[in-house]
Image: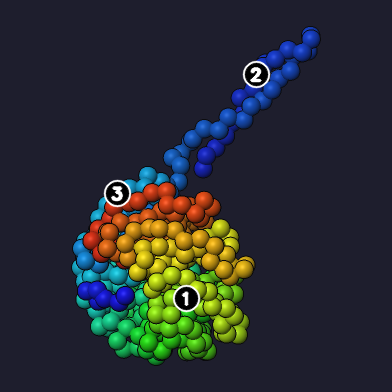
């Protein structure tokens, strides 16, 4: 569904006479860990609430919303900078995206791009931001320091999901109306190849090696697996109704796919490329991201205004966190 309204402990040795064996004392040194500084904070999840014009900040250590940031413009797409200091949130009604300072927890800037901004991504090096324009059929490349548009690249019709390869070499774009995925060379900022996928692709993710892309096809109720070296589909995996977005977990062995129309998440074994489980979550699940622990997967449920937390090992929902109206969180919304 598209709608414009629509985270060092130090240690010391404590030695003492702990036991006596016969007439021989044995000194046993016990390493006792203690905290010399506070433990590093767990990462935060940033959930765009499109109908509430806000972003909920979830502390994944406590499983609670610790702040709500006002973000005008019907926030939809989310991309967390690699260092975790900023979050970029697409704002379709404001025709661009907002820059959120994660320490201040407030919007510190906004960038005008085009009328149909939706999908948004940031490179692994944090130097560039990429924004898809649903109406103009292009992707804008923005310098993260100056927030100036470097180039606008034409792609297929109605670009939505974006993902950058782990080596920062390629940008992949799901073109919904064209039923395709564009591969953009980030050195030349030109489209290198295009792969045909299922009907109405929307969200997509890439594995840790950059070898496969998994594309959720909304209208054909399936996922296309694309081999990046040749930009050719190698498999089609049937899932459930209106798959929207995808995420990988457990060392890329599990693919999780949000199915909007039946309130579920399909779990696919990436070796056999077969669906192995179907997990019930909230109503109209959309955005999905994996915690840096590679085990817990967070799902934003649009109609319920909450987030389901899935344990990818047990394949069960272990928590539900209330967020805000129209929780969408399309993109990489999990900090590191």
Residue 41 in sight here: yes
Residue at the location (32% across, 51% down)?
A: 321
Which quadrant would residue 93 be assigned to in this image? bottom left
Q: Which mark is residue 16?
A: 2
Quadrant where the C terminus sits is: bottom left
Quadrant where the N terminus sits is: bottom left
Using the numbered discs, state the Cα–Cα distance from disc 1 to disc 2 in whole angstroms. 64 Å
* SS label for mark 1: strand
Q: Which mark is residue 66?
A: 3
Nearer the observer, disc 1 or disc 2? 1
* SS label for mark 2: strand
Using the numbered discs, state the Cα–Cα distance from disc 3 to disc 2 in whole angstroms. 45 Å
Nearer the observer, disc 3 or disc 1? 1
Residue 174 in sight here: no
Could you tell which of marks 3 and 1 lies nearer the N-terminus? 3
The colour scheme used to paint the residues is rainbow
Rate crowding at label 1 as few (under 14), some (14 to 19) or many (20 or more) other CA atoms within 10 Å.
many
**Closer-to-camera residue (78/309):** 309
Rate crowding at label 3 as few (under 14), some (14 to 19) or many (20 or more) other CA atoms within 10 Å.
few
Nearer the observer, disc 3 or disc 2? 3
Circle 3/circle 2 CB separation < 8 Å: no
**Percent of width and height locating residue 261:** 35, 69
Using the numbered discs, state the Cα–Cα distance from disc 3 to disc 1 in whole angstroms. 36 Å
Q: Is residue 7 above or below residue 167?
A: above
Q: Is residue 311 above or below residue 77?
A: above
Could you tell which of marks 1 and 2 lies nearer the N-terminus? 2
Which residue position is annotated with label 1? 222
Could you tell which of marks 3 and 2 lies nearer the N-terminus? 2
Which quadrant would residue 166 be assigned to in this image? bottom right
């Amino acid at each position: 569904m598209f709608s414009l309204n629509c985270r060092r402990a130090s240690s010391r040795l404590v030695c003492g006479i702990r036991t006596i064996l016969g007439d021989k004392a044995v000194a046993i040194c016990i390493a006792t860990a203690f905290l010399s500084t506070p433990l590093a904070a767990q990462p935060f999840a940033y959930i765009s609430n499109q109908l509430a014009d806000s972003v909920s900040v979830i502390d994944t250590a406590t499983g609670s919303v610790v702040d709500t940031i006002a973000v005008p413009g019907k926030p939809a797409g989310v991309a967390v900078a690699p260092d975790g200091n900023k979050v970029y949130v697409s704002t379709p009604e404001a025709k661009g995206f907002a820059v959120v300072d994660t320490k201040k927890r407030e919007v510190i800037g906004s960038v005008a791009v085009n009328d149909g901004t939706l999908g948004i991504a940031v490179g692994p090096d944090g130097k560039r931001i990429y924004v898809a324009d649903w109406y103009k059929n292009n992707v804008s490349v923005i310098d993260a320091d100056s927030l100036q548009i470097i180039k606008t690249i034409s792609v297929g019709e109605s670009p939505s999901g974006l993902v950058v390869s782990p080596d920062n070499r390629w940008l992949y774009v799901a073109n919904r109306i064209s039923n395709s995925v564009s591969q953009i060379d980030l050195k030349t900022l030109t489209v290198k190849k295009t792969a045909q996928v299922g009907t109405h692709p929307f969200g997509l993710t890439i594995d840790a090696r950059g070898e496969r892309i998994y594309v959720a096809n909304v209208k054909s109720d399936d996922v296309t697996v694309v081999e990046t070296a040749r930009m050719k589909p190698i498999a089609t995996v049937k899932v459930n109704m209106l798959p929207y977005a995808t995420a990988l977990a457990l060392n890329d062995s599990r693919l999780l796919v949000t199915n909007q129309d039946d309130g579920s998440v399909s779990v696919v074994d990436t070796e056999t490329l077969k669906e192995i489980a179907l997990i019930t979550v909230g109503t109209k699940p959309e955005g999905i991201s994996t915690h840096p622990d590679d085990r817990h997967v967070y799902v934003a449920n649009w109609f319920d205004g909450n987030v389901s937390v899935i344990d990818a090992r047990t394949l069960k929902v272990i928590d539900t966190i209330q967020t805000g109206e129209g929780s969408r969180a399309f993109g990489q919304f999990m900090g590191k």
